[in-house]
Image (tube, rainbow, N blue to C red):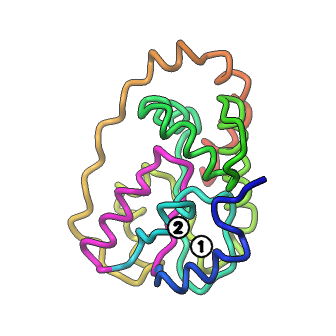
């Protein structure tokens, strides 16, 4: 195993780089949109070097004094989104999700990493008052924005409009076998907080 950033160094990097809010997700879940919004409209530092290198897709929360937001989406949508963006995203996100530069990316491993990340971020979320778990779609609703306001103690105004979702019919057809293999876990995530 060759970590992208040694886990023992992460908390110090968060402090040194003055990360204000740690936004994390598996990919394809609007974490970039939220981080840009918080930087541009509220001057919150969300896009540090460590965030770009690893923290934006880190596999688990760490105890720290800053707010953490875990954004999740339908795992199949995440899977297809990473494929749509090409091998660079498809593989790179797997290295980040595993914090290991020596993994062998694969479709099965990507799904496993998405499920592991979700489990790690949600299993004790109700005991961490510095953590907000939110679905991508919820970001674009009044109730979701109310949650962000309360959690971050800011006023959400002029939040970006939800982009039209990509049509992943072709990807569903191409990868239907791997998608079917993980349907039970996908259903579990899609029914979380419902």
Please give the range of residues in magenta: 20-43
The residue positioned 25% from the left and 51% from the top of the image is 161
Q: Is residue 27 magenta?
A: yes
The residue positioned 48% from the left and 38% from the top of the image is 88
| Residue 136 in the image, given as x and y percentages of width and height | 45, 51
Residue assigned mark 2: 69
Residue assigned mark 1: 131
| Residue 116 in the image, given as x and y percentages of width and height | 73, 49
From the viewer's side, name the closer residue of 187 and 178.
178
Q: Are marks 2 and 1 in contact (CB under 8 Å)?
A: yes
Q: Compared with residue 167, is residue 177 higher up or lower down, i.e. above or below?
A: above
Q: Residues within 10 Å of mark 1 (few under 14, many from 20)?
A: many
From the viewer's side, name the closer residue of 169 and 188.
169
Q: Is residue 88 magenta?
A: no
| Residue 153 lies in quadrant | bottom left
The residue positioned 51% from the left and 53% from the top of the image is 135
The residue positioned 73% from the left and 55% from the top of the image is 2
| Residue 128 lies in quadrant | bottom right
| Residue 126 in the image, given as x and y percentages of width and height | 69, 71
Sooner in the amino-acid sequence: mark 2 or mark 1: 2
């Amino acid at each position: 195993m060759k970590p992208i950033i040694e886990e023992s160094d992460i908390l110090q990097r968060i402090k040194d780089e003055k990360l204000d809010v740690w936004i994390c997700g598996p990919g394809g879940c609007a974490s970039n949109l939220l981080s840009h919004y918080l930087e541009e409209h509220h001057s919150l530092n969300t896009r540090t070097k460590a965030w770009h290198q690893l923290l934006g897709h880190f596999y688990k929360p760490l105890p720290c004094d800053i707010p953490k937001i875990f954004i999740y989406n339908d795992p199949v949508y995440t899977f297809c989104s990473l494929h749509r963006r090409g091998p660079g995203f498809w593989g790179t996100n797997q290295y980040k999700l595993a914090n290991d530069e020596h993994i062998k990316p694969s479709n099965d491993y990507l799904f496993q990493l998405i499920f592991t990340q979700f489990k790690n971020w949600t299993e004790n979320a109700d005991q961490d008052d510095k953590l907000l778990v939110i679905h991508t779609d919820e970001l674009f609703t009044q109730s979701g924005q109310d949650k962000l306001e309360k959690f971050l103690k800011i006023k959400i105004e002029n939040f970006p409009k939800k982009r039209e979702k990509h049509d992943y019919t072709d990807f569903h057809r191409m990868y239907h076998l791997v998608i079917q293999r993980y349907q039970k876990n996908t259903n579990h995530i899609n029914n979380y907080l419902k």
